[in-house]
């Protein structure tokens, strides 16, 4: 996301942007020399990404929540889940550096959650988890894994996003206390070797996979 968009988004959390001029917005984000047209452009980009609903003729600018609720109907809301790169579902050979790619717009009914707090999406690359079922759906190449970053202390057999040597992989977590090791297992129709770790190794669990958004079937 462009730095100006990030600043405008943060500003929207504490100010009603519909009451501010474009010049005032620029001043408020500590960029007083930016042109109003540039501020307008970035507001438009935020609207395209689903952060704002701008009704120019009514002079309304605000969060898109009410519009989303009307669209989906009572009892359901549309969540915006950030997509942050790709994780390999084989050996840990895809870099995990933060790479914001946009948002998935997902009904809360699909995730059984009413808030996107702590959630992000990773696109699965590879087939080492194509037999893993998460919330009744298999995680296959090209699908999106929904990660709950609030769940970083996994239980045995949880499917997790692990970061090893600054590289990301999705695997099933096994804490093998008897042998003083942690095992990250593939769950696949193909033959993939497990990853064996010691508790003191440099690795992290960035969250638990709680849901799968399937790649659309084009057939």
Image: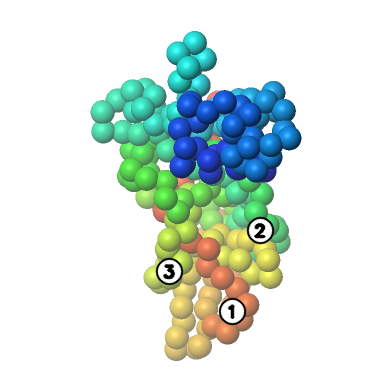
Check disc 3 and report its element: helix, strand or loop: loop
Are circles 3 and 2 on residues that touch, CB within 8 Å? no
Which is more foreground, mark 1 or mark 2?
Answer: 2
Taking the image as drawn, is residue 100 in sight?
Answer: yes
The C terminus - image quarter? top right
Check disc 2 and report its element: helix, strand or loop: loop
Is 148 situated above or below 20? below
Residue 78 quadrant: top left
Inter-mark Cα distance, 1 to 2? 18 Å
Is 166 situated above or below 137? below
Residue 102 quadrant: top right
Taking the image as drawn, is residue 133 in sight?
Answer: no
* Mark 1 / mark 3, whichever is N-terminal: 3
Q: Give the number of the disc on residue 197.
A: 1
Residue 190 at x, y = what percent? 59, 58
Residue designated by label 3: 154
Q: Give the number of the disc on residue 96.
A: 2
The N terminus - image quarter? top right
Residue 201 at x, y = what percent? 61, 81
* Mark 1 / mark 2, whichever is N-terminal: 2
* Residue drawn at (26%, 33%) of the image: 75
Check disc 1 and report its element: helix, strand or loop: strand
* Mark 3 / mark 2, whichever is N-terminal: 2
* Residue drawn at (36%, 27%) of the image: 66
Residue 215 quadrant: top right
Q: Name the residue nearer the viewer: 40 or 19.
A: 19
* Residue drawn at (53%, 75%) of the image: 183
* Residue drawn at (52%, 28%) of the image: 20
Using residue 181 as the reference point, say whether residue 125 is left or right of it: right
């Amino acid at each position: 996301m462009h730095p100006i968009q990030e600043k405008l988004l943060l500003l929207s959390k504490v100010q009603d942007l519909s009451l501010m001029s474009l010049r005032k917005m620029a001043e408020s984000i500590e960029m007083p020399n930016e042109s109003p047209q540039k501020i307008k452009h970035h507001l438009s980009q935020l609207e395209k990404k689903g952060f704002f609903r701008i009704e120019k003729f009514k002079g309304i600018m605000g969060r898109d929540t009410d519009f989303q609720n009307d669209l989906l109907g009572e009892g359901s809301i549309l969540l915006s889940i950030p997509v942050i790169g790709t994780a390999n579902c084989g050996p840990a050979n895809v870099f995990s550096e933060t790479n914001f790619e946009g948002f998935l717009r997902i009904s809360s009914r699909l995730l059984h959650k009413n808030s996107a707090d702590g959630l992000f999406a990773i696109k699965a690359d590879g087939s080492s988890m194509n037999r893993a079922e998460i919330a009744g759906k298999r995680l296959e190449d090209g699908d999106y894994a929904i990660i709950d970053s609030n769940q970083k202390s996994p239980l045995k057999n949880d499917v997790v996003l692990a970061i090893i040597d600054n590289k990301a992989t999705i695997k099933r977590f096994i804490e093998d206390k008897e042998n003083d090791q942690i095992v990250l297992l593939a769950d696949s129709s193909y033959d993939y070797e497990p990853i064996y770790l010691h508790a003191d190794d440099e690795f992290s669990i960035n969250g638990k996979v709680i849901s799968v958004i399937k790649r659309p079937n084009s057939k």
